[in-house]
Image: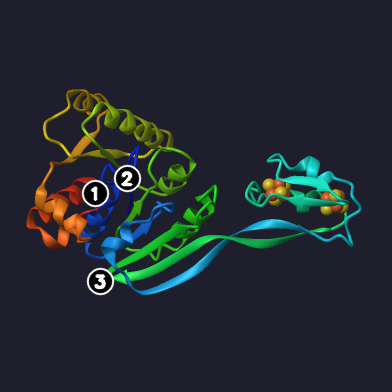
Amino acid sequence: MKIAVLSGKGGAGKTMVAVNLAAAAKRAVYIDCDVEEPNGRLFWKPAEVRRTQVGVAVPEFDPALCTGCRRCVDFCRFNALVYIRETPRVFPEVCHSCGGCALVCPNGAVREKSRPIGVLEQGRSGDVTVITGELSPGEASGVPLIREALRADTGSSLTVIDCPPGSACPVMESAEAADYCILVAEPTAFGLHNVKMVHELAVILGKPCGVIINKQEKAYEPLELFCRENGLEILARIGYDAEFARLIARGEILYHADRRAAALFDGVLKRAGGGRE
Ligand code: SF4
Ligand code: SF4
């Protein structure tokens, strides 16, 4: 089973939930798709880490074969090509690696070369395989790296996908393969707005989902109403807890360090359908 953990904004507790869910499963794969800020490994502290560079294909032009017809420039819908000084030139950050320019070139003057965009890390923490995508600073899109991270899934009874925050393309890419989505929400007006965004995404993807309300002091009725109206099960409510905060600040996994947290995430896993027999 694959569970994606989403939240409409950073800081809602998404990584904390994803890490503890994988810890509750004991044997699991944890994939950090939050490639701009992959923090899960701070908790897992994985060993035997292998790092591989991930790149995307960008065109390269052979001046000896290029006749200057400009078909490639006209074809590129992303405006990633310009024709300057008798040769096409590419803006690599704008290129979407569609390969179209190579296809339309009548002279075979376009080759592809790999441009590094980040690193994929794979290690182990006990019986959990920890896969982390780390996007290089300044890169515009983490989607190709997210695809590689998901492809690296070694397979287990449970895979937990820690999605990027928000509800844009990288989140869609991350959650698409999931069987179930957990939406992490804060009990505030802003939290409600954010959970609506990720819920809409889960509906578009056709995923069943449940909600974890984090940082709850008292129930926020509009959020409760939203969950009721949309048939969203509230899988857990996590209150402000000084001990939890101390453990998280020390980079410890709550499930391993606190019995109350262990019981809480055992319950979440069972309700989400990923519980052990
Ligand atoms: S690969 Fe596609 S996006 Fe990139 S330059 Fe060629 S046509 Fe444009
Ligand atoms: S399509 Fe091929 S030949 Fe024409 S300008 Fe582009 S690279 Fe040169």
Question: Which of the 4 image quarters holds residue 211?
Answer: top left
Q: Earlier in the sequence, mark 2 or mark 1?
A: 2
Determine whether, in the image, residue 53 is placed left or right of residue 3. Answer: right
Whether pointer 2 and pointer 3 mark residues with C-beta atoms closer than 8 Å, the reply is no
Secondary structure type for disc 2: strand
Amino acid type at image mark 1: Gly
Secondary structure type for disc 1: loop
Q: Please give the residue where the numbered disc 3 appears in the rendered image.
A: 126
**Nearer to the camera, 86 or 167:** 86
Report crowding for label 2: few under 14, some 14 to 19, many 20 or more residues within 10 A (C-alpha). Answer: many
Residue visible at 69% across and 49% down? Answer: 91
Q: Earlier in the sequence, mark 2 or mark 3?
A: 3
Residue 128 in view here: yes
Amino acid type at image mark 2: Tyr
The answer to whether mark 3 is within 8 Å of ligand 1 is no
**Nearer to the camera, 277 or 241:** 241
Whether pointer 2 and pointer 1 mark residues with C-beta atoms closer than 8 Å, the reply is yes
Residue visible at 24% across and 49% down? Answer: 273
CA gap, disc 2 and disc 3 = 25 Å
Q: Earlier in the sequence, mark 1 or mark 3?
A: 3
**x then y, percent, for residue 37:** 39, 53
Determine whether, in the image, residue 221 is placed left or right of residue 12. Answer: left
CA gap, disc 2 and disc 1 = 8 Å
Q: Please give the residue where the numbered disc 1 appears in the rendered image.
A: 273
Question: Which of the 4 image quarters holds residue 48?
Answer: bottom left
Query: Where residue 144 is drawn, which disc sits there?
Result: none
Q: Please give the residue where the numbered disc 2 appears in the rendered image.
A: 180
